[in-house]
Image (cartoon, grey):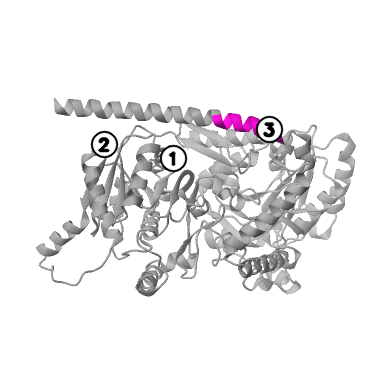
Amino acid sequence: MSEELDYKAAYEREKLKTADLAGRIAELEDKNQELEFKLNRIKNNPIWKASTPARNAMHWVIRQRDRIRNQGSLRGVIAKIKYKQIEKKAMTHYGTESFPSEETRKEQESAVFEKMPLISILVPLYNTPEKFLRDMIESVLDQTYKNWQLCLADGSDNEHVELVQSIVEEYKKDARAQITGSDAAGAASEATCKIKYQKLFKNEGIAGNTNHCLELADGEYLGLFDHDDILHPEVLYWYVKAINEQDADYIYCDETTFKNDDINKMITMHFKPDYAIDNLRANNYICHFSVFKRSLLDGTELFRPKFDGSQDHDMILRLTDRAEHIVHVPKLLYYWRSHAASVASDISAKPYAIEAAKGAVADHLRRHGYDHFKITSTRAFETIFKITYEVKGTPKVSIVIPNCEHAEDLKRCIDSIYEKSVYDNYEIIVVENNSKGSEIRGYYEELKNGGLKDIVKVVDYTAWKAEQDKAKQSAAAPSEGFNYSAVVNYGVKNSTGDYVILLNNDTQVITVNWIEELLMYAQREDVGAVGAKLYFPDRKIQHAGVVLGLGAHRTAGHSHYGQAGMNLGYMGRLCYAQDVSAVTGACLMVSRKKYDEVGGFDEGFAVSLNDVDFCLRLREKGYLNVFTPFAELYHYESLSRGLDLEGKNAERYDKESEHFRTKWKEVLDKGDPYYNPNFSLDRSDYSLNVEGYSSLRVQ
């Protein structure tokens, strides 16, 4: 009878909690609509519009003040400005200064690889301006690897076709476009020129025109090139090198947008990660310059007209699914021209591209067995997406919180879980470790006897450890000291959930559906650990994924650390879920099955780097680790155990760092696949690596 009453009481509590949350959400939505109405009214006010210059000046002053605060001093701001000046100067070395010297050109042109495939470069033309057309063709003719073919399908209208055709005919006579003995083997025997041109009866859009380019192609490999862009002279050389050394069947590189017809006037430099499926689903980060083995097209189309406007995203998703060796060449080898009619300038130039991109991603997800999902644009960009996967069922989630003293922090953490979380099938395991104070003991009693007794369980690691030591007759042995990994493993052992969240006691939940946002990824068979976006109390970023090799110890560090919470991140990275090498154990979800599969936390890492080591062992098993910005918490970092900056803490951190570097030497030597070697390992803000920038020529 008492059990039935307890059940009814718990049920009524949950009903009240759900009703309260629904009411608060409705109230917030009403307030949001009211504020949006007021904001729009202000923005449309003539006085507000007229005061724009004054406001801009004021905001500039405020930004400078904030920079001084962030850097700690005026000296810090000056150092930051100097770094940015050096970085800006370094950018120039990715332009024409990176082009090959005469010596390098001769060396690359004479290089003989085991495989010297013909690469057919497909370029759909449509009313292409003369300057753009000449720049594009010249960049192909100037390649240091010579076994290429340029296939042009022209959908230009009557007003432009004559000029376009005459320019192409001119270049077909260029000596660089003639097939020679060294590269004729891969081309069609009847051809005398590397440039093939076809005038189309009508313009069929990018997809249709490019498919006609494919009809002209003879190459074993195909490359996709836009009619208004420019290739680096060495791009095909590096791609063929990847084909020979890594058996690459799909290849892409880093790229930049430029303006004013000058590739040295760069707007945005996009240094990409290696192949990352979650990044690719969220946005077409691969983009240019894709070259792939023709056989990947067997039984499928190149571009599908129904995705015109985002045909390349659809194609990349389909072909990378089929590819066995996707290789990213981390060199800036593609120059994307920004002009009035280009997507590089403004996505609104092609608004249909947004819906086409959503359709391409949806089609890809359905092919991978996802039936129920939602794709929405993010605040970063219309074609950078949030993908909401279905949470299957309501599996039990165990939230494991190690704790020593700090009653106030623990209470804030647990209260936020209970008050904010809309997911209700969870338990909280507090792992007590060596607390002495009466305040925390009093709070434990409150948890044991209060309204959260059915949700929260306190387990005593210290007492358990003492019993273990006694059983081993080692009670008199010197204390091994605090071991966070052992505490975590004990907590997981005493939990009963299908999924585990490791959570620091100095965190506080912000997002009401934080558990669901983590769970939708943790439920995937291909995903290991999932991490949340964590903020300092001032809303600056504490965690947004872990980068290997980052920081003074060259072990691992948090990306975007200390940046403003509303920052979009490098190329929008703070706005979409993505694959990373590791996530912080301050808030980490993993399935119990996978936790056990890798043996939990390695107790050889007593305090530091155990979470990164755990994630790398998951990666070793073939699982992806994912960071999602849509599960947000505050993290009052290091309140519990102090910073690793001085004394014994520093000694211990140095020792564990050395252990980490030794254990994962091979992985660290290769570099973080989700970062880029062009970025600095001394900064967490995706700044350029300016060390020796004068030697940044592609090499």
x and y percentages locating residue 186 in the rendered image: 67, 55
Please name the residue that numbered disc 1 is placed on: 517
Which of the marked residues, 2 or 1, is nearer the chain's N terminus? 2
Which of the marked residues, 3 or 1, is nearer the chain's N terminus? 3
x and y percentages locating residue 203 in the rendered image: 78, 33
- Left or right: 395 as drawn, with respect to 366: left
Query: Which sits in the foreground, 307 or 572?
Result: 572
Query: Which sits in the foreground, 358 or 318?
Result: 358
Marker disc for residue 414: none
Please name the residue that numbered disc 3 is placed on: 40
Instruction: Tell me the amino acid under the disc marked 2.
Output: Gly
Query: Which sits in the foreground, 515 or 261?
Result: 515
Q: Are marks 3 and 1 in contact (CB under 8 Å)?
A: no
Q: Main secondary structure of the magenta part?
A: helix
* In this view, 46 is above or below 672: above
Q: Residue at x 78, y 38 (%)?
A: 47
Residue 617 can be seen, yes or no = yes
Query: Which sits in the foreground, 442 or 410?
Result: 442
Q: Which residues are magenta?
A: 31-42
Q: Secondary structure at mark 1?
A: helix
Q: Secondary structure at mark 2?
A: loop
Residue 179 can be seen, yes or no = no
- Left or right: 177 as drawn, with respect to 498: right
Decide whether residue 40 is among the magenta residues. yes
Please name the residue that numbered disc 2 is placed on: 451
x and y percentages locating residue 694 in the rendered image: 69, 73
